[in-house]
Image: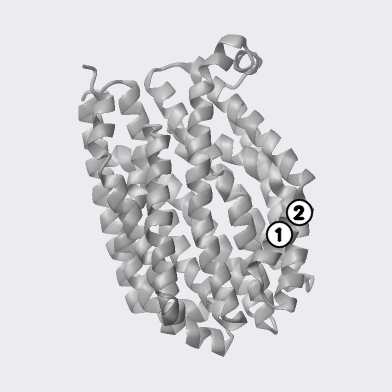
Amino acid sequence: MSDNTVTHRQVWRIAGPMIIANISTPLLGMVDTAMVGHLSAAHYLGAVAIGSMIFTFVFWGFGFLRMATTGLTSQAYGENSTAKMQAVLMQSIWLALIIAVLLLLIQLPIRNLALHLVSSSQDVEYFAAVYFDIRIWSAPATLINYAILGWLIGREASKAALLMVLVINITNILLDALFVMGLGMDVDGVALASVIAEYSGLLMGLFLLKHYGLNKAGICLSLSKKVLQQSRHGLHVHGNVMIRTFLLISCFALFTTQGARQGDTVLAANSVLLNFITFMAFVLDGFANATEALTGKAIGRKSPTMLKRALSLTAFWSILMAMLFSLIYLLFGSSIIRLLTGIDAVIEFAGMYLIWVIIAPMIAVWSYLLDGLFVGATRSREMRNTMLFAAFGCYLPAFYLLQPYGNHGLWAALIIFLAARGISQSFYIGKIMRLADPN
């Protein structure tokens, strides 16, 4: 069998561990929701929703550290260039550390601005501030972990990435139970658990890097003049993916803040339903991760056959999984809501909008799949441009026009946004396929 042949087994060898790793992250979000969702008042749940949204923007906004690192590493892996792989890793780690220090220096302005923009109730704002003041200290570990995970995925070390993510999330879940259920803490316990878990993951990540051959020579190489000159492309990729990611997170942040303006109960109901979206997204991202790694490898090897085969197989499994999610949410959505909260008003409101998360998987699957193609091909400019179109050309107009329909209008705008991403990305598929053509 040719080394450029892609099989179902190879797709699952990459996607399987990443699906398990990715599932553990929304499960953690569900545990956070369930822990505070069964406390005495809805404002605890609203505070965690707002606090999590802020860090989704602050931390996931720098998710380009993971995605760009994966794309650059996978291409270097396809070229069999260890030196390039190590240079990409160290560049990303240094960038992550610089960003983390800046975040810690300006944490108070970030917190005050974020809480002002959200404009929630006084109780929610107070507890969200408590959550923020603790969680922000995980910044160095969180951002460096992004870089390490991106590097591991790019070189198809999915089991190592799985181990690292499981250390973070299992530690977080156990500490959630200890601090909230055992010690009687509330949002402060949830935030503290996240901080300790991220540093636990960093220690595991550093151990894995040593296992996969990172050495002093690689660190020195990453700082050499030659490699710094070559890294301009990497910084360009990081920059465009950063813009794309901040736009994506901003759209979801707008969704959360507009829910907050409709009251604590609507905010809490939307936060419960967003767990459905997040869970689905992280499963589909497992196949996107496989697409990233295989696309970069195919381009590095200049193999159009490998690239076409990889995209067709990952598309097959992504669509199948999306159909399965829609079916599960249709049959068991109401029961899942009751697992996440015991507050009757929140259960009632969440049930009213359940239809939107039932249809979301089949709409969203295309954007997740094509994100993997764009990341592996390091086509960051196209990623940025399609996101600009989806956000400003579709989501914001839909959001404005559908305001009279309340929370249903808000969910409809989100679905339109997801559809616009996939449609606009599809126009670039042919261009990306040509990147693997040796002629």
Q: Measuring 59% from the left and 86% from the top, which residue is drawn there?
A: 343
Q: Is 404 placed left or right of 302 in the picture? A: right
Comparing 317 with 264, the one in front is: 264
Give the answer, above or below, for where 112 lies relative to 79: below
Q: Amino acid at mark 2?
A: Pro
Residue 239: image location, x then y, percent: 53, 35
Marks 1 and 2 sit apart, C-alpha to C-alpha, by: 6 Å
Q: Which mark is residue 113?
A: 1
The residue drawn where x is 68% and y is 56% is: 194
Residue 320: quarter of image = bottom left
Q: Nearer the viewer, residue 267 or 142?
A: 267
Rendered image: mark on residue 210: none
Q: Which residue is mark 2?
A: 109
Say whether marks 1 and 2 touch (CB < 8 Å): yes
Give the residue displayed 64% in from the left and 74% down from the top. 46
Q: Position of residue 126 (x, y in %)?
A: 77, 71
- 270 lies above or below 324: below
* Three-letter amino acid code of the residue under disc 1: Leu
Quarter of the picture holding the C terminus: top left
Q: Quadrant of the N terminus?
A: top left
**Numbered disc 2: secondary structure:** helix
Give the structural element (helix, strand or loop) at label 1: helix
In front here: 320 or 365?
Answer: 365
For label 2, count other residues whose C-alpha is less than 10 Å away and answer few (under 14), some (14-19) or many (20+): few
| Residue 13 seen in the current view | no
Q: Position of residue 203 (x, y in %)?
A: 68, 38
Give the residue at x 53% y 21%: 231
Residue 193 visible somewhere in the drawing = yes
**Residue 178 at x, y = what percent?**
73, 65
Q: Nearer the viewer, residue 330 or 381?
A: 381
